[in-house]
RNA sequence: GGCGCGUUCGUCUAGAGGCCUAGGACAUCUCCCUUUCAAGGAGAAGAUCAGGGGUUCGAAUCCCCUACGCGCUACCA
């Protein structure tokens, strides 16, 4: 408790900002702040082949939109920078070399071709793919001559052949792996950049991260990280592996089967507070069982004891329901302010504001407003018959109803409210002779 | 294949040995409100707590096995 609490998210900037990142950001920030600590953003861009420049900006924008801005990070500042891994390469190199000097790692001169061949060979023999340790026991002379020849090399961890590694997961309890499952993983690539596993451990140590809270998919590599901490002689942080968000078929949430981009939700007009509320409900619950709550509540109440272990299915229908509740809870003026960015530039904003109270109860996403209110703004062919049109009307009767609605609208007392609208609709129905259920 | 993690209504979950003939929410259905559509209110249906063994006076809750699902198994993260 006396120790400082520092948590981080470490997304890689390889595409649109991902809901999984928002999900992790939520709990990392909430826990960090719950304990009076810091929440850090670090960009894991060591995979240069997948690097995407605008991505970093978009991640930060998305976090800002959700109210999950970090206390430290690229472009934000902090005393533990740089917060982008490619700017920290010397640090990884230095530490990797140190591991080699201390005999916990070694230079591997195997070419990619050899490794590929090895893998196919193993596959052919139905053996599990694993490094065969070819360079693990090279003599000093062999290493020297390889270097003299200018051969490039990677640095691999020299994993103990015996023993087990156990770590405690704040959500799942003790987890144990046999060391021999690890097969000398590469730590430093031949381009001098670290592999994720080296980078996280080094960065988390130098950034003084106290709790590593990340997705379940990292459980398998945690023993490797623990081993690294031990070889470096560093304190091992607490670990907590959150359940993985799932598609409806229970596979790991993916672009193909879900909208994984935070940008998409924003464009559709999901409110950030609805996103937070929904995400918080995935794998966690409030102690009092309430289901409508905000970030402040999560921050106040979050504990790992209340995190569930099963992977929750990301249900857009439920999100939409929650979103509707938040929309309805907003005062009209505020709702309108939020709505503005979603309206077409040429839309009559005064009219839109006038119409808003009527639409409020029907709005499920801000982005829906335009299509739902088309007929308020003029002849809109093909608008959906959601508001006042009989379900079973013919195209002609629908059109007629619309025309008369417009006349009626202008005669309704202003400002329009839900009530004036309802009574107006009743009057209109009378006028048209429309029966309930028609 | 190997290793690991998981498994309560369709979905999100409550539940930490007796309060559980398993509670809530979303979705579904019915009714009320309403001469539209929603919103709101009230109900209904929906889970032999994955299956099987234990432990115990008593198990959704503890232990073991099996099944199934998922994840990892890259010079990706």
Image: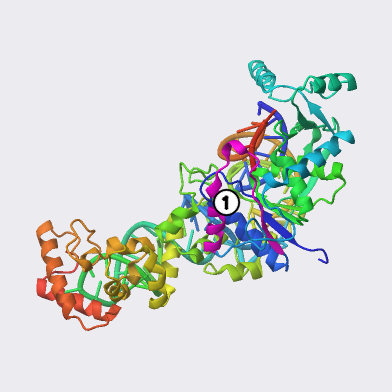
- Asked if residue A215 lies left or right of residue A245, the reply is right
Residue B61: image quadrant is: bottom right
In the rendered structure, the residue with mark 1 lies on which chain? Answer: A
Query: With B72 as the anchor, is A270 left or right in this view?
Result: left
Residue B32 position in % (x across, y down): 29, 74
Question: Which quadrant is the N terminus of chain A positioned in?
Answer: bottom right
Q: Image point 14% across, 60% down: which residue? A: A393
The mark tally for this picture is 1
Other-residue count near label 1 (Cα within 10 Å), few / some / many at <14 / 14–19 / ≥20 = many
Question: Compared to A142, does A98 lie above or below?
Answer: below
Left or right placement of residue A340 versus residue A70 in this view: left
Residue A256: percent from the left, percent from the top? 46, 41
Q: Is residue A226 placed above or below A179 in the rendered structure? A: below
Residue plotted at (71% across, 58% down): A7
Which of the pair A63/A437 is nearer the observer? A63
Q: Is residue A10 magenta?
A: no
Asked if the magenta segment contains residue A45, the reply would be yes
The residue segment tinted magenta is A38-66
Q: Is residue A24 above or below residue A374?
A: above
Q: Nearer the viewer, residue A163 or A235?
A: A235
Query: In the picture provided, is A109 more to the left or to the right than A417?
Result: right
State the residue in front, A34 or A351. A351
Per the image, label 1 sits on a secondary structure element best described as helix
Which of the 4 image quadrants contains residue A228? top right
Residue A207, how many percent across, how many down?
Answer: 76, 55
Q: Residue at x 69, y 24 (%)?
A: A128
Q: Quadrant of the C terminus of chain A?
A: bottom left
Residue A303 shows in this picture:
no
Q: Quadrant of residue A282?
A: bottom right
Query: What x and y, as percent, mark residue A421?
Result: 24, 77
Residue position for label 1: A56
């Amino acid at each position: 408790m006396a120790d400082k609490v520092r948590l981080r998210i470490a997304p890689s900037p390889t595409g649109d900002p991902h809901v999984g990142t928002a999900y992790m950001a939520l709990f990392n920030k909430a826990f960090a702040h719950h304990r009076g600590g810091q929440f850090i953003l670090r960009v894991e861009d060591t995979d240069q082949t997948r690097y995407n420049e605008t991505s970093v900006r978009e991640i930060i924008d998305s976090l800002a939109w959700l109210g999950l801005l970090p206390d430290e990070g690229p472009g934000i500042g902090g005393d533990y920078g740089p917060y982008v891994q490619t700017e920290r390469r010397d640090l990884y190199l230095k530490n990797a070399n140190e591991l080699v000097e201390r005999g916990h790692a070694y230079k591997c001169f195997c070419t990619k071709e050899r490794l590929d061949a090895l893998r196919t060979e193993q596959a052919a023999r139905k053996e599990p793919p694993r490094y065969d340790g070819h360079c693990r026991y090279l003599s000093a002379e062999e290493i020297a001559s390889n270097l003299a020849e200018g051969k490039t090399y990677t640095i691999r961890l020299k994993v103990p052949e015996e023993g087990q590694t156990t770590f405690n997961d704040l959500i799942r309890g003790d987890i144990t792996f046999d060391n021999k499952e690890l097969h000398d993983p590469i730590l430093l690539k031949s381009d001098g950049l670290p592999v994720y596993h080296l980078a996280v451990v080094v960065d988390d140590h130098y950034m003084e991260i106290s709790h590593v809270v990340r997705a379940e998919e990292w459980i398998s590599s945690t023993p490797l990280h623990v081993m690294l901490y031990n070889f470096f002689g560093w304190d091992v942080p607490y670990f907590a592996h959150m359940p993985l968000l799932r598609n409806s078929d229970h596979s790991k949430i993916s672009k193909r089967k879900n909208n994984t981009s935070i940008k998409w939700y924003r464009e559709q007009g999901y409110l950030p507070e609805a996103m937070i509320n929904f995400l918080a409900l995935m794998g966690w619950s409030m102690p009092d069982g309430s289901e409508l709550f905000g970030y402040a509540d999560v921050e106040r109440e979050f504990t790992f004891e209340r995190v569930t272990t099963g992977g929750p299915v990301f249900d857009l229908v439920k999100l939409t329901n929650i979103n509707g509740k938040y929309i309805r809870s907003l005062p009209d003026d505020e709702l309108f302010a939020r709505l503005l960015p979603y309206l077409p530039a040429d839309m009559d904003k005064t009219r839109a504001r006038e119409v808003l109270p009527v639409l409020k109860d029907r709005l499920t996403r801000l982005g829906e407003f335009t299509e739902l209110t088309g007929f308020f703004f003029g002849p809109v062919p093909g608008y959906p018959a959601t508001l006042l049109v009989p379900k079973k009307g013919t195209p002609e009767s629908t059109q007629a109803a619309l025309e008369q609605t417009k006349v009626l609208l202008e005669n309704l007392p202003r400002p329009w409210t839900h009530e004036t609208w309802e009574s107006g609709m009743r009057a209109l129905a009378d006028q048209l002779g429309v029966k309930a259920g028609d």
